[in-house]
Image (cartoon, grey):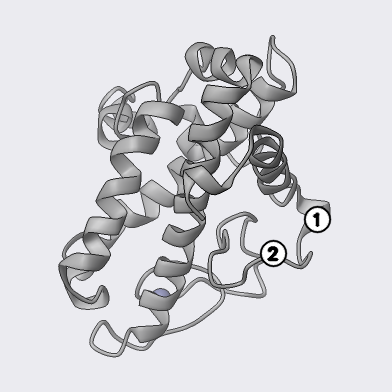
Amino acid sequence: MSESDINPDQAFTFLRNAVRAMIPSNAGSPVPNPNRANLLAQSPRASHPRCRVCAWPGHQSNNVHKASACRDAIITTIGFWEDVLANVQVSYKGHLPFQMAIQENKVTVNMIYSDAPKAIESGGMEAVIVNRLAMNYLKFQRLWASLGPKVSYIMEGDRDVIRYENITQALNDYLLAKNSYEQIVMKAEPNTR
Ligand SMILES: [Zn+2]
């Protein structure tokens, strides 16, 4: 999906559906493209433990040297965020309330650690969508950060990592008010880290 293929209505619908999939009662709903899906849309259920290597849900690898299932999960998630980025770019240009919601979005460190977002104080549906996307994006960034040196074993070379870096730079600007995940963590009180 590239930016030029999408019109603003489609873009906003994509983002709205992406956020809808994060509502617990929508767990297990079919996803439009299983190869580019938000595997972190939902909190994992206790009966489905996270992978002990990468901490993504939905699979289990035994060790970092046999981690193709980890790479598949992470690449699937990166594909989802690539699609989010394309749709955010179109919505930002073509849908003024969305652009305002991005500009007014407040990112707090609590968003990293909370799975239960508080009600948004002001703004319409656009503000809710930007807030929920940002929270879920932080979840993705937190898991990526926790991979640490394992990234070089799990991912297949620079190309994978460049895909991650490309979405990260752009989505930090749009969803995290130009902060990186690390910058937001640095702002946290030490006892909440
Ligand atoms: Zn894994």
For residue 115, what is the image quadrant? Answer: top right
In this figure, which residue is indicated by the disc labeled 1? 26
Residue 33 visible somewhere in the drawing: yes
Q: What residue type is labelled 1?
A: Asn
Q: In the displayed structure, does residue 75 sit left or right of residue 180?
A: right
Q: In the displayed structure, does residue 154 sit left or right of residue 141?
A: left
Q: What residue type is labelled 2?
A: Pro
- The extreme right residue here reads 25
Q: Nearer the viewer, residue 13 or 81?
A: 13
In this figure, which residue is indicated by the disc labeled 2? 32
Labels 1, 2: front one = 2
- What residue is at 72 percent from the left and 41 percent from the top? 13
- Few, some or many residues within 10 Å of mark 1 (<14, 14–19, 20+): few
**Residue 142, disc:** none
Looking at the rendered structure, the secondary structure element under dot 2 is: loop
Ligand 1 image position (quadrant) = bottom left
- The extreme front residue here reads 4
